[in-house]
Amino acid sequence: MKKLAGFIVDYRYKILILMLLLAGVCALLFPRVEIVTDMTRYLPDDSPMKTGLAIMTEELGGLASENSIRVMFTDLSEEEALEVKEKLSSLEYVSSVGYQAGDEQYNRPPYTLFSVNTTYDFGSREILALEASIRKEYGGYHDMEYHVDTTTSNTIPPWILMAAVAILLTILWIMSPSYAEPVLFIVTIGVAVLINMGTNLIMGSVSQTTNAIGSILQLALSMDYSIMLMEYYRQEKREVSGSASGSDEKEASLLAMKNALEKAFRPVTGSSLTTVVGLLMLVFMSFKIGADMGIVLAKGVLISLICVFTILPVLILSFEKAIVKTRKPVPKFPTGGVERMSIRFSRIFPFLLLGLFITVFLLRGNTNIAYTLVTESPIDDVFEKNNAIVLLYSNEDEEIIESFIGEYENEDCVRSVSAYANTLGKAFTGKELLAMASAMGMEDSFADLLPGTISPSELETMLDMLIGMCSASRGRAEEEPRATIGELLEYITEDLPQNPLFGSWISPEMIEKAEEFRIQIDEGAKRLRGPSHSIMAMMTTLPDEADITMDFIRELERKCTEKLRGDWYLIGNSVMACEMSGSFGGELNRITILTAAAIFLVVIFTFRSFVIPLILVLLIQTAVYATVVIMGVQGLSMYYLAYLIVQSILMGATIDYAILYTNYYREARREADLPGAVKEAYGKSIHTILTSGLIIVIVTAILGYVFGDPSILQICHTIAKGASCSLVLILFVLPGTLCALDRWIVKK
């Protein structure tokens, strides 16, 4: 390492230029990284829903991709409601507006709801412009409220990164002995963030969750490497400095940096190794979002480590005068009371730690695990959100599906059931056809097929007549004639013009409109019925994730297993949650064991002791379970991804603080007694522990609120709570535990 340290210092400017060029290239590459918002892409390979989605995409083109913004008004008259619908429909980027006068789905006096549909992705420039148009047009009008059905964003707003940097700088300025040091740290890790974001192109794509919080977590998790190197340099500079001349002072700085790099390499890389190993354990999740986030964050930590050893030395040596000129006092943390408590009650602490672990281990099961999180809206208190559950079934079961349709149409929680059998494949009377067209907003399409302007009753009569003629032309003698939409349009475009009585009545314009309508219907049929599979889509009022929803899905699965002969698949957000709930317990246990075992081995390698890793792993796992219990006490559900991430981050990152204290304690015990060792370990470690720990806690706690996505918010807040639990246990429980087990920890 000595030769490498010399190389880094001697060729520091060339290395800096190389790293900056790499950061510049990566900044250009980052926009080319695909940001994935569809979480179904991360389903396990053996997921039935993933298999169903693949079949649906191949045969039916996938699920419809329209997104919606719900807009609610108070005390609108029917006339005003129709005007609002027309004006909303005319807004740029709007594909359609859902509203039906008199329908309870849209009208619950005094409230009126409109569903503004668009084909653009959430977080896109078009969606943001559409939101702005709605606010501008209706802000304050009849107490307008609107809600985007998902707040997922594909990009990180620059102001969020600026806020993260500002918070980091504030903490570092308070805790650092110089005002210049934090700026150098931010620049170093900032370059690492750019390189990490650009090298994500290697992965092809990253999830929007990883993209949104990856950079901020990289900043928070790797900042302590810069602090540690700076502290080593400061110590080495005091030892080698002594000459008053500028030339000798420069040589002293270069020598001090070489020594600092050599001495810092093992502890800093050891610290990063636990973090990387902890994060890489996410790769073993069957839900591939874990691998996505684990690889990106682990790669980011490694890149930060490289930047700390290559970029920061150049910055420290170049701006050493600024560091000296901006020196300031650092906060002092009185630890005398904790030191005395750790010595006096040391025998209690191992039992206290074990008792805490058993308690939170048993209580963690009382916290509900959530697999989907949504933002709350005042609109939800009046109008239930639609929750779509799709059944993809084999065409050989078409007749059986008709009984399913009838059964589920009568369910209280089901608003509508749509399948080929009861829409485009169903034979209608004129009245039934108009009712379906009205529900789908297509009544004008039928009116356009007929000459002149006619009333709804006249339209029904004309359709009944055409349906009767169509049915008769196919040799069907029915008491109440019926025809499918496709049959009716085929008759109008091909047979009716040849009819001697009505041929002159059909104009070329009517035939052209009928042909266009027929093409639309054919395309619609292809979305419902494929070569071997079809779909039955149920629009329900069920919550995205609740016991009643899980029971509904499991009952549907049971009926499909009993009644359907061919293969079938359920698709939907709630279906995905139901799938995950069935496997999460086992997966969590697997990740917990793998993470604990991996970190255990790393700590054994570091300390050459069996007892120390046992204590440290138990300590941090207690913090993980305590975090889960705290969420339950607060009445919150624990987001599954937040659970897995906090497990990996606490075990991988905050265990570094425990390692730091333990290392100083063992070194001090070689010459000092117990009280002296505890005091020295606190004195040397507490500043670094609190600086790095507070960065993780405060940055994630504050920035969690600025993300609109509820899943990202909970991930950030869970990390903040978990890191807080770790800090409390490390600072107040670990010292006494080490004292109690001193004979098995200290090598004499």
Image: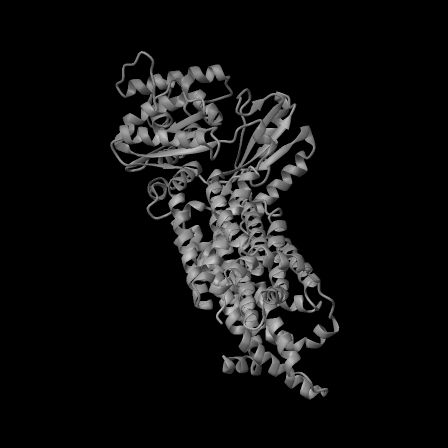
Q: Residue at x 38, y 40 (%)?
A: 582
Q: Does residue 414 appear in the picture of this structure?
A: yes
Q: Position of residue 127 (x, y in %)?
A: 57, 43
From this view, report whether residue 421 is shown above or below residue 728: above
Q: Does residue 199 appear in the picture of this structure?
A: no
Task: Give the colour scheme shown.
Answer: one colour
From this view, report whether residue 32 is shown above or below residue 81: below
Instruction: Give the quarter of the image for residue 174.
Output: bottom right
Q: Residue at x 40, y 27 (%)?
A: 417
Q: Position of residue 381 (x, y in %)?
A: 58, 28
Number of numbered labels in the structure image:
0
From this view, report whether residue 88 is shown above or below residue 733: above
Instruction: Give the quarter of the image for residue 675.
Output: bottom right
Instruction: Give the quarter of the image for residue 714.
Output: top right
Decide if residue 175 is on the left or right side of residue 97. right
Q: Position of residue 361 (x, y in %)?
A: 47, 45
Q: Position of residue 587 (x, y in %)?
A: 39, 47
From this view, report whether residue 186 is shown above or below residue 323: above
Between 435 and 284, the residue placed more toward the observer is 284
Check the image and name the residue furthest to the top.
479
Between 567 and 286, the residue placed more toward the observer is 286
Q: Residue at x 27, y 17 (%)?
A: 476
Between 91 and 715, the residue placed more toward the observer is 715
Decide if residue 137 is on the left or right side of residue 48. right
